Image: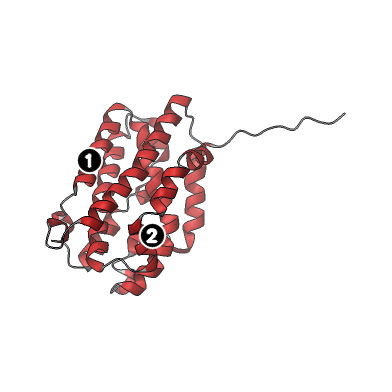
Amino acid sequence: MSTPTMVQSESFADRLKTETRPQHDAAERHELQRALLKGALPQARFVALVGQLMLVHRALASAIRGALESDPILAAMWREAYDQSPRMARDLAHFGVDPDGVTPTPATTAFIDRIGQWAGAAPASLLGPLYVLEGSTNGARYIARAARQAYPVGADDAGVTHLDPYGERQPEEWADFRARLNALDLDEATQRAIVDAARETFNAIGAIGDDVLTARAGSTLFD
């Protein structure tokens, strides 16, 4: 008599990957992302993109920090290393941009507002954008290689440090992130909220990319 095969349930990290696949693929196919990978995005637009993403990272990190005492899920997951905004600020300064003078585009403003809504109504949902932004460090390593050739990078990778924050430790850092995510005790409603927030985040990053690509030279985006 054969022994029944035990079917192992899908981990939450795998569920996130599976259920956000269409949005992830659309983000990867975005014109801006393709230009970044080729090293073909004009420097001014690259710097503008860094500025917009810095604002997103700042908003997300601030929202999570504000909920750590009241939300055990976020408290169990958060690490300060996930906040890439300080690296982005230094990279902007390398290109002569004041990080505190960056003006958000309409898409950035809308997404920051959305982060605020999640923080107020369902703080654990913030793991959705955190998953997307932290996960982007995997592909960003390839973008970093192109950026080092395309733009005047300074000592210690100044200008592109946010693209490769972990260096050779990247695989281990991502494995740790996934393990920490899978260790969380999440009910179905919370898992669904996180997945939905991750989907929205992929779409929002695409909308921010649209703003960066379509802004006219001389606009506040390029100050």
Q: Amino acid at mark 2?
A: Pro
> Residue at the spot x=47%, y=44% of the render?
21
Q: The disc labelled 1 sits on which kind of residue?
A: Ala
Query: x and y percent of residue 72 in the render?
Result: 39, 31
Quadrant containing the N terminus in the rendered view: top right
Q: Are marks 2 and 1 in contact (CB under 8 Å)?
A: no
Q: Residues within 10 Å of mark 2 (few under 14, many from 20)?
A: some
| Residue in view at x 35 percent, y 30 percent | 71
**10 Å crowding of disc 1: few (<14), some (14-19), many (20+):** some
Q: Which is in the foreground here, disc 2 or disc 1? A: 1
Q: Is residue 193 left or right of residue 86?
A: right
The numbered mark at residue 165 is 2
Numbered marks: total: 2
Q: Is residue 134 left or right of residue 100?
A: right
The residue labelled by disc 1 is 110
Sequence order check, earlier mark of 2 and 1: 1
Kindly report the distance in space between the C-alpha atoms of the residues bearing marks 2 and 1: 27 Å
In the image, residue 204 sits, relative to residue 116, either above or below, namely: below
Q: Nearer the viewer, residue 203 or 223?
A: 203
Residue 120 horizontal/vertical position (percent): 26, 29
Left or right of 92 on screen, residue 160:
right
